[in-house]
Amino acid sequence: MLGAGLAGSSLAKALADKGWETALLDRQRFPRHKVCGEFLSPESQSTLQAFGLLETVKVLNPSIIDGIRLIFANGAAMELPLPSSALGISRYSLDSALHGAAQQSGVQLQTGTTVTAVHPIIGGYLIETKQGGEISTLQARTVIAAWGANQRSGLPGHRQERLAKPSYLGVKSHFHGVWMERMIELYFFPGGYMGICMVEDGLVNVSALLNRDAFTDKGKSTLAILDAAMKRNKRLYEKLRGAIPVEGTQAAVAPVQLHRKLQAWDTIPLTGDAVTMIPPLCGDGMSMALRSAALCAPLADRFLQGNLSSLDWQQSYTRSLHREFQGPLRWGGFLQRLFDQPLVSGLLPSAARLAPRLAQVLVRATRLKPYS
Ligand SMILES: Cc1cc2nc3c(=O)[nH]c(=O)nc-3n(C[C@H](O)[C@H](O)[C@H](O)COP(=O)(O)OP(=O)(O)OC[C@H]3O[C@@H](n4cnc5c(N)ncnc54)[C@H](O)[C@@H]3O)c2cc1C
């Protein structure tokens, strides 16, 4: 498994649980802080349950979230209840906990190991890796890419699409000293939005997705960028004025590309953000990463048993990804475009008051169905 984020760890665990010798490689060392809203949607819990991972997450003491509050630049706000509770948990804790569970199932975890090439050979693949200055090779019957959104050129899943406009920057930091209800709060302002989500241990995660053009001159540090962003929404500024950043929890990522087409396969199967990315606004990226892994796992198992050809695996996996993801992606993209236009988004609270059911139907359309 190439990449040990949520998609990689859960899929590696599922294959090890089936008895397959499984290696999980990642270029980073863990635990590490990662740009993410750290909002684990209700839908993701049914998939975690299917992997036998829900308890692993619950013992981390995540916060419980019952609703979403949207606060616009003009001060207007609207609240949307969630169909069931979501969880707030840092990627620092979550990713490492999933690694632990995967290792208990027999997965060999190798971090600090960058995959530099994947070559098809007779009966499998040859994987080239770099660890420090050392180059090694590994042979496997099958290889699955779970290496997130931005892959280096020459590797499966790398997209040569021209950078779509607008291009986004993601930033995050943990803070303490912020009072929260059991709500995730999303604040909108010209040039982006910021999410505040309570995670474990009374900390809050503050993450933002920003239009890069609107923030190029706002300083180099993540905290300077977050500070510039929070000043663009008065209520946000008031909320975070006394907040104290937690040292070492800052992270940034660019470019974040929101309009990549769904791609299930590129020489090898792709999972998680390597497939596509739903706008982070929907808070369902982790859920989709887990779901793609859940769809891929039984097919990989059948392939390894010799009961499914590679072509049938590819076709079946592609079909199921389209079936489950196409609706949420379409409506997620629509919402992102709506919120990119301050004039239109400023009218949303009044529109939602006039048609509250419509707002809920729209939000529901961006969600995955519970896993069964
Ligand atoms: C600003 C922002 C806010 C978000 N907020 C939320 C939210 O609140 N809720 C939500 O559900 N989703 C959110 N998301 C989306 C979510 O973070 C992703 O969808 C999720 O992390 C995808 O998981 P993954 O396992 O596919 O990839 P990742 O978690 O990105 O893991 C990929 C792993 O592959 C490794 N890797 C990459 N290349 C190589 C290589 N060549 N060799 C070895 N290893 C490699 C990386 O080091 C990484 O650890 C947000 C995203 C952004 C940008």
Image: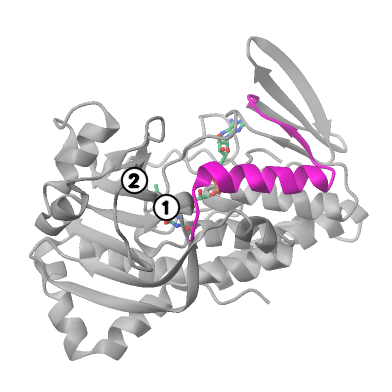
Q: Where does residue 317 sit, x and y in percent of width and height?
A: 68, 62
Kindly indicate the quadrant of the structure image that contains residue 291.
bottom right
Q: Is residue 227 left or right of residue 161?
A: left
As drawn, the label of residue 364 is none
Q: Quadrant of the N terminus?
A: top right
Label 1 amino acid?
Gly
Location of residue 73 by image quarter = bottom left
Q: Is residue 211 above or below residue 138?
A: below
Q: Residue shown at 87%/42% (left/top)?
A: 21
* Secondary structure found at label 2: strand
Query: What range of the chain is rendered magenta?
Result: 88-114
Residue 136: x %, y % from top left = 75, 17
* Badge 1 density bin: few <14, some 14–19, many ≥20, Cα 10 Å: some
Q: Give x and y (percent) for residue 235.
A: 13, 59
Q: Mark 1 and 2 residues: CB-CB less than 8 Å, in contact?
A: yes
Q: Which residue is mark 2?
A: 176
Q: Earlier in the sequence, mark 1 or mark 2?
A: 2
Q: Secondary structure at mark 1?
A: helix
Alpha carbon of mark 1 to alpha carbon of mark 2: how far? 7 Å
**Residue nearest the viewer, comparing 244 with 361:** 244
Question: Is residue 370 visible to the viewer in this orientation of the structure?
Answer: yes
Instruction: Write down the quadrant of residue 316 in the picture.
Output: bottom right
Identify the residue at image location x=78%, y=42%: 103
Image point (66%, 18%), residue name: 131
Which residue in the protein does label 1 denote?
Answer: 202
